[in-house]
Image (tube, rainbow, N blue to C red):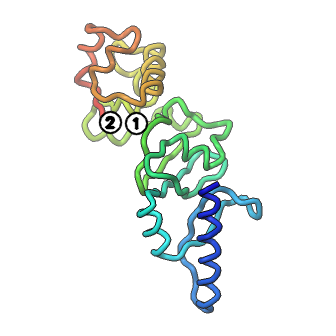
């Protein structure tokens, strides 16, 4: 309710300011929660004042794209997580590949969240893996994890489940908390994985 009151107040201020600035164009767009009028969630903003107010109020802006119902830029409270942004974007589509996404990850201002479609993850090697050859446990897909020695599809699913349940890996040694991964398997893969 408080958010709606703030939104309505900001909209009224924006309209009042637009009435006195005839001839000027509004170049910036902020996509917020979808509106009933057009379903796109578009709402104009004034180049800088509203963004400064949002930072003071602990707000962040995140772009959500890919396999979601309403891709766009969304305003969230600082400390929000990926699943909050996905919910604002109308949720994932039927063809979304959510197994490779850590929905509990904290968001930061200016971050882009891309939801893969089924099939996009196959054969795709992450940029971070290309850089140093190691797989990031917090962003790797099931397919990427299954390429590690001693990790098949079942253990890869277990790693993804543990990651989602615990909000990600804090250190590579957390792998040994995953069912089926003990000292022997860990020693085979410890130099091939990383945590960011």
Residue 9: x %, y % from top left: 62, 70
Q: Mark 2 points at which residue?
A: 129
Q: Which residue is at 47% across, 24% downward?
A: 165
Residue 121: x %, y % from top left: 50, 35
Q: Which residue is at 74% across, 63% downward?
A: 38
Residue 50: x %, y % from top left: 50, 71
Side of 196 relative to 71 (left or right): left
Side of 60 relative to 24 (left or right): left
Residue 156: x %, y % from top left: 44, 19
What is the C-alpha distance between the residues marked 1 and 2? Answer: 7 Å
Q: Are marks 1 and 2 in contact (CB under 8 Å)?
A: yes
Q: Mark 1 points at which residue?
A: 125
Q: Which residue is at 22% across, 24% downward?
A: 191
What element does badge 1 sit on?
A: loop
What element does badge 2 sit on?
A: helix
Quarter that holds the C terminus: top left
* Vertical placement of residue 77 versus 192, above or below: below
* Vertical placement of residue 154 versus 108, above or below: above
Nearer-the-camera pick, 83 or 58: 58
């Amino acid at each position: 309710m408080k958010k709606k009151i703030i939104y309505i107040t900001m909209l009224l201020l924006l309209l009042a300011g637009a009435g006195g600035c005839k001839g000027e164009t509004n170049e910036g767009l902020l996509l917020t929660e979808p509106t009933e009028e057009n379903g796109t969630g578009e709402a104009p903003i004034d180049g800088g004042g509203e963004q400064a107010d949002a930072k003071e109020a602990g707000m962040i802006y995140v772009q959500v794209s890919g396999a979601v119902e309403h891709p766009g830029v969304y305003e969230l409270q600082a400390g929000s997580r990926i699943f909050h942004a996905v919910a604002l974007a109308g949720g994932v589509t039927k063809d979304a590949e959510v197994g490779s996404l850590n929905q509990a990850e904290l968001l930061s201002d200016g971050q882009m969240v891309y939801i893969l479609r089924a099939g996009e993850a196959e054969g795709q090697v992450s940029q971070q893996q290309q850089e140093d050859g190691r797989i990031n446990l917090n962003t790797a897909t099931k397919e990427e994890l299954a390429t590690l020695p001693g990790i098949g599809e079942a253990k890869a699913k277990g790693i993804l489940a543990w990651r989602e349940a615990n909000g990600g890996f804090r250190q590579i040694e957390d792998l040994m908390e995953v069912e089926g991964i003990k000292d022997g398997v860990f020693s085979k893969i410890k130099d091939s994985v990383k945590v960011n």
